[in-house]
Amino acid sequence: MPTTLNKIAKQGDNGATMMPIIQGVGRAAIEIAAVLRGAVFRGALGGAGSENVQGEQQQMLDVLSDEIFLDEMRSTGFVCAVGSEEQEELLVIEEYSHADYLVLVDPLDGSSNLDVDGPVGTIFSIVKRKTANSERPHVSDTLQSGQSVIAAGYVLYGPSLMMVCSVGAGVDGYTFNPASARFELSHADIRIPETGGYYSVNESNKDKWLDGMGDNLDRMKIETGLGMRYVGAMVADMHRTLLKGGVFLYPADEKNTTGKLRLLYEAIPMGFVMEQAGGKAMSNGIAVMDIEPEALHQRVPVYLGSNTNVDSLLG
Ligand code: AHG
Ligand code: MN
Ligand code: MN
């Protein structure tokens, strides 16, 4: 009998409470995958004609994925609010505003890949509210460091549909089996290789990187001899780094002076998974998981991957 997402209920201290929410993520993933696959026939590729709070052009699929994800979180009954890349403010789920958990999400990661049929993803993390259940959830409930994250993971819309997640008891990968129409455990207890793999970065920005990171990368390349791969969708680049080893980085640069990737729904969930798989996630000289968030859409530099490679890059 294949193992399904039900495995999560038996994992760690929080598996049982997290399972219904992660199953909701799984339903959203199946629906988003179907929308992505049929998008060209529904005229759903291209811009939505709107900007998100970060001044980025929203794609129609960013907006659709956000709606689908929110609906599935609502349907769990355990989520009081969602903080999304595509929503300026915290979105309170009125029917369940007394519930215990908040979800942070990048509903569609790597959307510049959409027009070229490249891989994209969804990234999520789950925290418990700090405000009393009788109060209305507040954005301050999302401003918790990675140390408070209870569960996190990502979905990869690639040749197969995968979900990789952790409830703080290691990392498992589930692949959607079209024959049984459910996620089945395909990658049990993922551990990142101690070294090897690839370095992954948009190297065209190197001359503009801050913090001397250009010199660091040059030194690391000589030290490790790693080859390079870059998809331009964090989920796909993270997934390869997790399975093959190496290092993924997005440093601060002259344009993105505090970094490009978002702390709460990109850096922290990926940092959580990376550490749970035995790897490392750093930013500005401290662990990503130790950053105290100040704003919902805050950006940070990110360096994550195999311990030895991250050390070699930052050392
Ligand atoms: P999003 O599509 O959610 O805005 O995220 C894009 C991010 C991330 O997926 C990727 O690692 C990075 O942007 C790529 O940026 P560059 O195109 O600057 O390399
Ligand atoms: Mn993203
Ligand atoms: Mn996105």
Image (cartoon, rainbow, N blue to C red):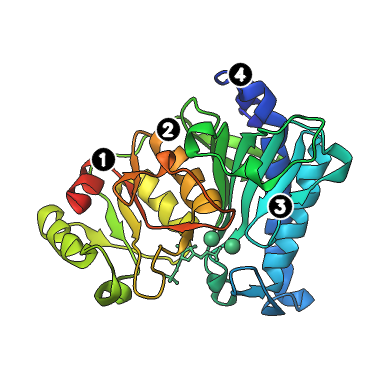
Residue bearing mark 4:
10
244, 297: nearer the viewer: 297
Residue at position x 44%, y 30% in the image = 189
- Distance Cα–Cα, label 1 vs label 2: 12 Å
Mark 2 or mark 3: which comes first in sequence?
A: 3
Mark 3 or mark 4: which comes first in sequence?
A: 4
Mark 4 or mark 1: which comes first in sequence?
A: 4
Indicate left or right for 85 with 169 as reference: right
* Helix, strand or loop under label 4: helix
- Distance Cα–Cα, label 2 vs label 3: 27 Å
Residue type (three-letter) at the residue carrying disc 1: Asn
Residue type (three-letter) at the residue carrying disc 2: Gln
**Dividing the image into four equal quarters, which quarter contains ligand 3?**
bottom right
Disc ID at residue 276: 2
Mark 3 or mark 1: which comes first in sequence?
A: 3
Residue bearing mark 3:
90
Mark 1 or mark 2: which comes first in sequence?
A: 2
Residue type (three-letter) at the residue carrying disc 4: Lys
* Helix, strand or loop under label 2: helix
In front of the other: label 4 or label 2? Answer: 2
Residue at position x 32%, y 44% in the image = 286
Disc ID at residue 307: 1
Q: Is residue 162 visible?
A: yes
Residue at position x 46%, y 50% in the image = 267
- Distance Cα–Cα, label 4 vs label 1: 29 Å
